[in-house]
Amino acid sequence: MKPKIFNYDRLVKSEDLNHHRTLFAGRCSEWFVEAGFIAVASVLPASNIVCVKIHGLTFTSPLKSGDIVLLQTEMEKLAFGIRHFLIPPR
């Protein structure tokens, strides 16, 4: 059975920025958890889902207001992981 892939797009808005005018890491972490929740909720009741920890989330380039973030999740043995952060070139 081929795993189902979920795409979760987010628009970076001014309220998502830090004092450097780039995406606040905490907001991106929140989106990461939401993307995972949506994927897992497709096969389990929401009341049975818990995010235990986020470890090793690395940010390699800044995002600014107006950028679109694509978080892509893939179900694998009732676990999830972000496979890609796709950011369109400016």
Image (tube, helix red, strand yellow):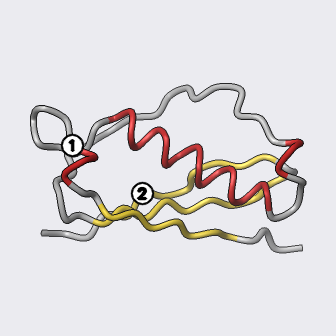
The picture places residue 69, in percent across and down from the top left corner, at 36, 61
Residue annotated with mark 2: 85
| Residue drawn at 56 percent across, 70 percent down | 7
Residue annotated with mark 1: 17
- Nearest-to-viewer mark from 1 and 2: 1
The picture places residue 55, in percent across and down from the top left corner, at 55, 26
Is 52 located above or below residue 83 in the figure? Answer: above
Is 88 located above or below residue 65 in the figure? Answer: below
Q: Which residue lies furthest to the front in this view?
A: 15
Query: What is the quadrant of the C terminus in the image?
Result: bottom left
**Label 2 Cα neighbours within 10 Å, binned few <14 / some 14-19 / many ≥20:** some
Could you tell me the amino acid type at mark 2? Answer: Phe
Is residue 44 or residue 87 the one in the foreground? Answer: 44
The picture places residue 78, in percent across and down from the top left corner, at 85, 50
Is residue 14 or residue 59 the one in the foreground? Answer: 14
Is 57 located above or below residue 8 in the figure? Answer: above
| Residue drawn at 34 percent across, 35 percent down | 25
Is 68 located above or below residue 21 in the figure? Answer: below
State the mark number for residue 43: none
Could you tell me the amino acid type at mark 1? Answer: Leu
Label 1, secondary structure: give it: loop
Query: What is the quadrant of the N terminus in the image?
Result: bottom right
